[in-house]
Amino acid sequence: MNLAKTFVRSVFKNIPRLRFEDQHLSSFSGAVIYERLFKMLGLRSSLANCVRHLPDSSAYGISRIILLLIVHVLLGWRRLRDVEYYSDDPMIKRLLGLKKIPGFSTLSRRLRDFDLTTVDNVRGLCRAMVMNRVLASGIKRLTIDFDGTVESTKSRQTIGTALGYNKKSKGSRSYYPLMATVAQTSQVFDVLHRAGNVHDSNGAAEFIEHCFAEVRRSGFNGTIEARLDSAHYSVGTCERLDASGAEFSISVPFHRLADLKSKVESTKRWSSIDDTWSYRDLGCSWWPASWSTAFRCIVFRQLRPEPLKGEIQHDLFEPTDWQYDYKVVVTNKTTSAKNVLEFHNGRGSQEAIFAELKSNNAFGVIATRGLVANQIYRLSAIIAHNLNRELQMRNLPQERSMLPKRPALWIFENLRTFRHRLIQRAGRLTHPKGVATLTMSANKKVANELTSMMEILDPAA
């Protein structure tokens, strides 16, 4: 249909004058979805239980400070000072259950009231939220990936940070938390807070055992799987994982095992997986001399897309070849080598979770100089991420089955896109005849999506 120019074009000669009035306007009308979700999950009461041990006579309850941090991240803000940009938003006040949102100074001061018991309680809440989703989804095989990630800061006064390995910001102090993520739901199950100068395996064995114990305590009776990188390769870790009843795969580091390199280079017979991958299953015939227990060891090699040309630099530790790249995996799985390879290669999905956390959930932000306050902020970012995943899992169909690589069972949308589509919508909050009414523009796409989500999240439904 062709339209005349007069129906399409318009000329505006004057720049509008600015006028600021309190008209109960909201820039985050779509946050009404979170209000319904919080109510369904009982988030406010759960947070209140986390700080019940702390004396609190302030008008701003300690649990509401944590809720404010979670909402702060969900809305897309990163620094604590940014709270001043939405302090008058009526929808956010309603979401927090406050008539007045605390300013930056008050928020910073209240963060000093938290203690390590609060941190442990909030970690427990995070685990409970994830396991409630796992049990509700009927998942029978739970895959947990373990890996560390760096959080850098330029400040030398931030408590608990230290100089350590930091390839993106060399010389900066950092934290190095160990993360446990659930592959099937793409959520963070738990986090171990650590300084930046520790090895990736520092405290990992005890943390892994604790995670498995919490999974069983929640009532999960299915199979638990674990995937780890070469930093966790040790007889103690393998024995603990095997004793816990979990199926695991761990990368084997060549640089610590010179005789393994020789054994791989002397291998002549390889079994084919496909046009790219082949393998040699060593079974339990090889293990380090210092180990008291043998586990299945599989050597994989991958054909290079383009063979190397000319001279090659001989490596003292890893096998060098013109045509192939090598990797070794130790496991207690009894399935085929192809399934073990695909399962272990699925660890890459955890990097996507880290990217989502840091880019869209302010996970990499070190908000204060206090150790406990930074841990609470980190946990708030994790809960915000888990809530976003929970919201989508309640509104989206399960689109994948349990595949060998263990991808997420749902196809998720990142939080930034979700904010732009639905959360950051202008609206007016009014109370005609005493009924709270949120009025937004009549965009059919937005109206249909919001209405559908609200109906699914209706506790009475």
Image (spheres, helix red, strand yellow):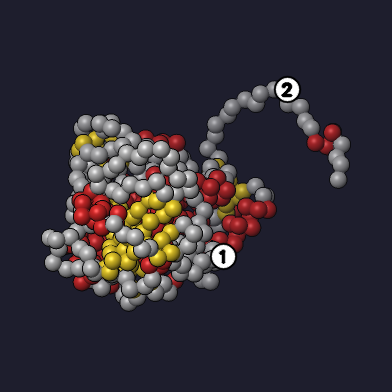
Q: Is residue 77 visible?
A: no
Question: SS class of the residue under badge 1?
Answer: helix
Whether the residues at callouts 2 and 1 have beta carbons within 8 Å, the answer is no
Nearest the viewer among 354 and 248 is: 248
Which amino acid is tagged 1?
Glu
The alpha-carbon separation of the residues under discs 2 and 1 comes to: 45 Å
> At 33% from the left edge and 73% from the top edge, which residue is drawn?
334
Q: Position of residue 131 (x, y in %)?
A: 35, 67
Q: Position of residue 160 (x, y in %)?
A: 19, 41
In this image, 47 relative to 13: left or right?
Answer: left
Nearest the viewer among 199 and 261 is: 261
The residue that disc 2 covers is: 13
The residue that disc 1 covers is: 455
Question: SS class of the residue under badge 2?
Answer: loop
Q: 10 Å neighbourhood of mark 1: few (<14), some, or many (≥20)? A: few
Nearest the viewer among 423 and 229 is: 229
Image vertical order of residue 441 relative to residue 406, above or below: above
> At 45% from the left edge and 36% from the top edge, which residue is drawn?
85
Q: Position of residue 437 (x, y in %)?
A: 57, 54
